[in-house]
């Protein structure tokens, strides 16, 4: 299982957390807390939409599977 890091209200993959902390943010000029707050807000804002899209994708995949099983 992937290691997880809890950051604010989010649980993220350790590899993603390390990438952001060690490679993406340094030298970009974005303060860590500003990034964390923005990422947290964005994920929570889009969560319902993402759930709907995942459900839609599952329905489409079921239809595709049924088509190919005929």
Image: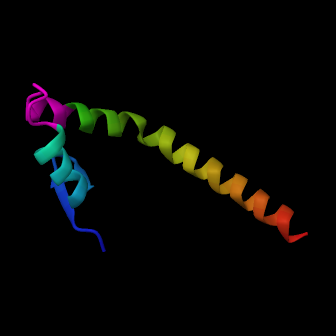
Q: Quadrant of the C terminus?
A: bottom right
Q: Residue furthest right?
A: 70
Q: Position of residue 59 (x, y in %)?
A: 69, 54
Q: Residue at x 56, y 50 (%)?
A: 54
Q: Residue at x 28, y 33 (%)?
A: 41
39 lies left or right of 5 = right
Q: Quadrant of the N terminus?
A: bottom left
Q: Bounds of the magenta span?
A: 25-37
Q: Position of residue 21 (x, y in %)?
A: 12, 45
Tell which of 57 and 21 is nearer to you: 21
64 to 51, vertically: above or below:
below
Q: Position of residue 44 (x, y in %)?
A: 34, 39
Q: Quadrant of residue 37?
A: top left
43 lies left or right of 29 = right
Q: Residue at x 71, y 52 (%)?
A: 60
How many numbered discs? Answer: 0
């Amino acid at each position: 299982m992937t290691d997880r890091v809890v950051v604010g209200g989010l649980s993220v993959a350790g590899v993603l957390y390390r990438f952001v902390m060690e490679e993406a943010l340094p030298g970009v000029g974005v303060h860590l807390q500003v990034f964390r707050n923005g990422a947290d807000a964005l994920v929570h804002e889009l969560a319902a939409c993402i759930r709907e899209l995942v459900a839609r994708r599952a329905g489409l995949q079921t239809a595709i599977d049924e088509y190919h099983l005929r």
